[in-house]
Image (cartoon, grey):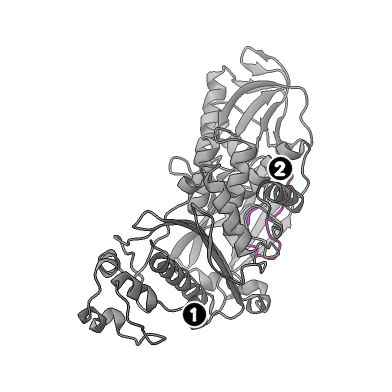
């Protein structure tokens, strides 16, 4: 269809399509083929739908577009194109990761962050070291650490005889999810067993008297502690906007003065999440009257007793937020935690962990094409076919609570405004990389029919020609992505009309 449709028009056209309706603006463009006389108006509406191939060609995406759609209840394949071509799924991979976490860990699984002591507490003083031990919680924030510090005081601790140590070895340390990303993008942080604020630090700047006041904080709504491990220096230049250097045990940043304007803020990735969490906890404990030394890394946990702990929300709630906001850190943490439990041994890298998940997907759903290199979809080397992704979602529909965790896919009109009363209800996971766009999920039709689908589009030649510095906002990337999302909606609307009973 050349115009995106409203609920009233969609339903009205299905129930009654008169000759006069053919002269209305909906049908302003001539049909692609001659229409044969038909007795029922809904058959005529189906007849005038543009073939999927025409929609793909009109999108002008270059590269390859593959899709597969099936009837949810019967499994009948309704339509496909290049459905056996392996494509990068981008964040659509998170739908598989969510199902993996639910299956291996369970919907009620909770991550724990603990404070341990290597000695007894005597007259309020720990007669040994205090350890902040991470259990991998990807959602731990400064408020959570503040709660932990308050609980430490409530447990009667007033001081520590030994050192303050941090442990993040529950999961492997990974400097960044994808080495090909620019240094400064917040969606590509380090990964560890001890994480804080999605491993991002809040950089804010304000112009004053010809120079800039800058802050680097572990900010939440309730707390704004300054951090020392991450430094920012304003440099008189125009480009590059940011530079990063790991020097002296610190995250050292510079920013171009010419890019700052009057003021602003952004989240920058953290490369030392353990030190970040330890430094913030030290500050919050001090506010409770408990003095801790500067944090020291532990390679392994000694014998120690638990003083207090905080738990995350249940995994199902974490995954719902992950799918809504597409948080890469959460996907990698959940995936690695599940892989360690499934394999019964520590994983050493994202790729190794992804291979464990790939084996689970092949065994559980018979997916011959699945070849992911991480759990978030950020790595461009990941591959899966549209047919396999669709098949997995269909099988998951009856065995997991994945569909309720997927967020509604907003249908837009020609002015890119949300159509609030659109007749099709779509729950899906989107995926976007530079010149890569994916969408996979479920479509509920007005007549009660449910479809399951996957759409992958990628112009890998265009992506390969990008410089690393262009990967945050590549030339032409926004327009390409807009056309890809329009194609996704047009295909879904086509299916909604052609395959309604």
Which residue is rendered at x = 59% and y = 27% of the image?
Answer: 309
Q: Quadrant of the N terminus?
A: bottom left
Distance of mark 2 from mark 1, alpha carbons?
Answer: 39 Å
Label 2–label 1 contact, CB within 8 A: no
Label ID, residue 465: none
Secondary structure found at label 1: helix
Instruction: Name the residue rendered at 78%, 46% in the picture.
Output: 348
Question: Does residue 348 appear anywhere in the picture?
Answer: yes
Picture coordinates of residue 429, whole percent (x, y): 51, 57
Q: Secondary structure at mark 2?
A: helix
Residue 474, by quadrant, is bottom right
Location of residue 246 by image quarter: bottom right
Q: Is residue 333 left or right of residue 210?
A: right
The residue segment tinted magenta is: 173-190
The residue under label 1 is 59
Label 2, on which residue? Answer: 339
- Direction top: furthest residue: 123
User: Which of the two discs, 2 and 1, labels the residue nearer the N terminus?
Assistant: 1
Position of residue 312 relative to residue 419, above or below, is above
């Amino acid at each position: 269809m050349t115009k995106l449709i409203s609920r009233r028009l969609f339903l009205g056209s299905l129930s009654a399509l008169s000759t006069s309706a053919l002269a209305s603006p909906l049908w302003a463009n001539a049909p692609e083929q001659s229409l044969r006389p038909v007795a029922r108006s809904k058959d005529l509406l189906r007849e005038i739908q543009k073939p999927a191939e025409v929609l793909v060609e009109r999108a002008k995406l270059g590269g390859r577009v593959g899709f597969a759609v099936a009837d949810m209840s019967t499994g009948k394949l309704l339509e496909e194109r290049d459905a056996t071509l392996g494509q990068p799924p981008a964040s659509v991979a998170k739908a598989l990761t969510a199902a993996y976490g639910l299956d291996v860990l369970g919907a009620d699984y909770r991550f724990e962050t603990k404070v341990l002591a290597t000695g007894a507490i005597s007259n309020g003083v720990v007669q040994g070291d205090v350890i902040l031990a991470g259990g991998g919680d990807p959602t731990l924030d400064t408020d959570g650490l503040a709660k932990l510090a308050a609980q430490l005081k409530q447990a009667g601790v007033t001081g520590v005889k030994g050192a303050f140590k941090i442990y993040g070895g529950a999961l492997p340390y990974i400097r960044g999810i994808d080495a090909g990303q620019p240094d400064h993008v917040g969606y590509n942080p380090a990964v560890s067993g001890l994480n804080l604020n999605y491993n991002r630090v809040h950089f804010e700047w304000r112009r004053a008297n010809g120079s800039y006041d800058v802050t680097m904080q572990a900010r939440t709504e309730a707390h704004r502690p300054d951090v020392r491990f991450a430094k920012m220096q304003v440099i008189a230049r125009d480009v590059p906007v940011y530079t990063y250097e790991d020097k002296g045990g610190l995250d050292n940043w510079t920013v171009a003065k010419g890019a700052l304007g009057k003021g602003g803020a952004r989240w920058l990735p953290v490369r030392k999440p353990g030190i970040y969490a330890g430094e913030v906890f030290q500050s919050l404990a001090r506010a409770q009257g408990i003095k801790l030394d500067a944090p020291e890394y532990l390679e392994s946990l000694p014998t120690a007793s638990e003083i207090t702990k905080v738990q995350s929300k249940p995994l199902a709630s974490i995954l719902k937020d992950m799918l809504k906001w597409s948080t890469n850190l959460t996907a990698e943490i959940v995936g690695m935690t599940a892989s360690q439990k499934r394999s019964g041994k520590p994983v050493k890298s994202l790729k190794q962990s992804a291979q464990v998940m790939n084996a689970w997907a092949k065994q559980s759903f018979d997916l011959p094409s699945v070849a992911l290199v991480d759990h978030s979809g950020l790595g461009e080397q990941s591959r899966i076919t549209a047919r396999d992704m669709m098949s997995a979602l269909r099988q998951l529909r009856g065995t997991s609570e994945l569909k309720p965790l997927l967020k509604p896919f907003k249908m837009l009109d020609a002015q890119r405004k949300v159509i609030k009363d659109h007749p099709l209800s779509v729950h899906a996971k989107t995926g976007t990389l530079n010149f890569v766009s994916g969408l996979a999920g479920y479509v509920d039709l007005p007549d009660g029919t449910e479809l399951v689908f996957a759409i992958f589009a990628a112009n890998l030649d265009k992506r390969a020609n990008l410089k690393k510095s262009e990967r945050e906002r590549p030339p032409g990337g926004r327009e390409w992505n807009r056309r890809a999302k329009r194609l996704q909606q047009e295909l879904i609307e086509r299916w909604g009309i052609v395959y309604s009973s």
